[in-house]
Amino acid sequence: MQTQHHWPVYGHDWAVQHLRKGIANGRIRHAYLIVGTESIGKEMLARSLAMALNCTNHEESARPCGECRSCKLISSGNHPDMVYSELDANTGALKIEEVRAVCQRLALKPYEARYRVAIFRDFDRARPQAQDALLKTLEEPPPQALLILLAPSTESLLATITSRSQIIYLRPLPTETIRQALLQDKGLPADYSELLARLSGGRMGWALRAAADPAILEQRTAALDLLEQLLTLNRAQRFEIAEDLSKDKLALYPLLELWQTYWRDVLLLCQSSAHIPANTDRVVSIQQLAATLSVDEALKAIQATRTLHHNLSTNLNLRLALEVMFLDFPGLKHTR
């Protein structure tokens, strides 16, 4: 599935070629910001860049080779010169203390590689004060150090961060690209490859995880069943579900991400779009729902879901926020 390069990246060939050209011309930036929806391949591209820079293969055109000690350690997540940020286990936020700790480790000289690389996952979950803690490192980067920030969008990032980073936008991959990867490289049956490719919404990372763990599809089914059930409930019943969901904040990140894809499908059908729904296994229910809603009602639901997803890393009253979102979902006027 690769095109003219040795990077372990599916699709996003323009991004790979852009980075390869920078390496070949000695124009590596000290900070990159890779932007794209969850599981689209941001971290794989980041790791591949680190592998290419630190690969010990004597042929530069063959880097990353995937076979040398450096490539294998980076691929497995065990390289001593790779630093990864961790989110707070309770809030899901990227705290200022964590940003400072990663910067301190990045400032150390490489132990065995050419570059010491720090990857900040989910940098959008860093509040402004935590983002500010990165500015000194961005303005005065240590020698032989590389910063790679990952985020679904630049919406919540400070201008001082985006202006000091080279931004690489990753877009959803074509369904056929993902289908071929699952079919040819992973050896999955044709019908299963087609299903996962459709459900992935262009996210190669999600498709690969779902291929390796059937429980992911089961969790997805349960999450969409819950959403469709919500639309038949009255206010009090919705608030009971809000109370249950508020007990696990971290589980809401993937849940709301999935619900946004569902509402996007509904909205497009409300607008009589020829778009093929990303949730192809829910076509009938999506069509039935879209037939009962106005464009404004569908838009209100997707905006409410997006707003809560965006605000999860803030100090909000989670139960109240869920209740507010559920009040913006359609169906209440039919259940009073």
Image (tube, helix red, strand yellow):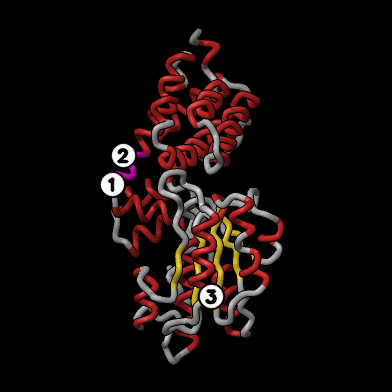
Q: Is residue 136 left or right of residue 16?
A: right
- How packed mark 2 is, by other alpha carbons closer than 10 Å (few <14, some 14-19, many 20 or more), is few
Residue identified by numbered label 2: 218
Residue identified by numbered label 3: 107
Marked residue nearer the N-terminal end (3 or 1): 3
Residue found at x 64% / y 53%: 157
Q: Is residue 181 above or below residue 231?
A: below
> Where does the image place residue 322, in percent across and percent down from the top left?
50, 28
Seen from the viewer's position, the closer of residues 171 and 135 is 135
Q: Real-space Cα distance between discs 3 and 2?
A: 43 Å
Q: Real-space Cα distance between discs 1 and 2?
A: 7 Å
Q: Pointer 1 and pointer 2: residues touching (CB < 8 Å)?
A: yes
Q: Amino acid at mark 2?
A: Glu
Which secondary structure lies at badge 3? loop
Q: Amino acid at mark 3?
A: Ala
For the N terminus, the image quarter is bottom left
Q: Which mark is residue 214?
A: 1
Q: Is residue 244 above or below residue 129?
A: above
Extent of the magenta region: 214-219
Q: Real-space Cα distance between discs 3 and 1?
A: 41 Å
> Where does the image place residue 238, in percent across and percent down from the top left?
45, 20
Which secondary structure lies at badge 2? helix
Q: Amino acid at mark 1?
A: Pro
Seen from the viewer's position, the closer of residues 101 and 326 is 101
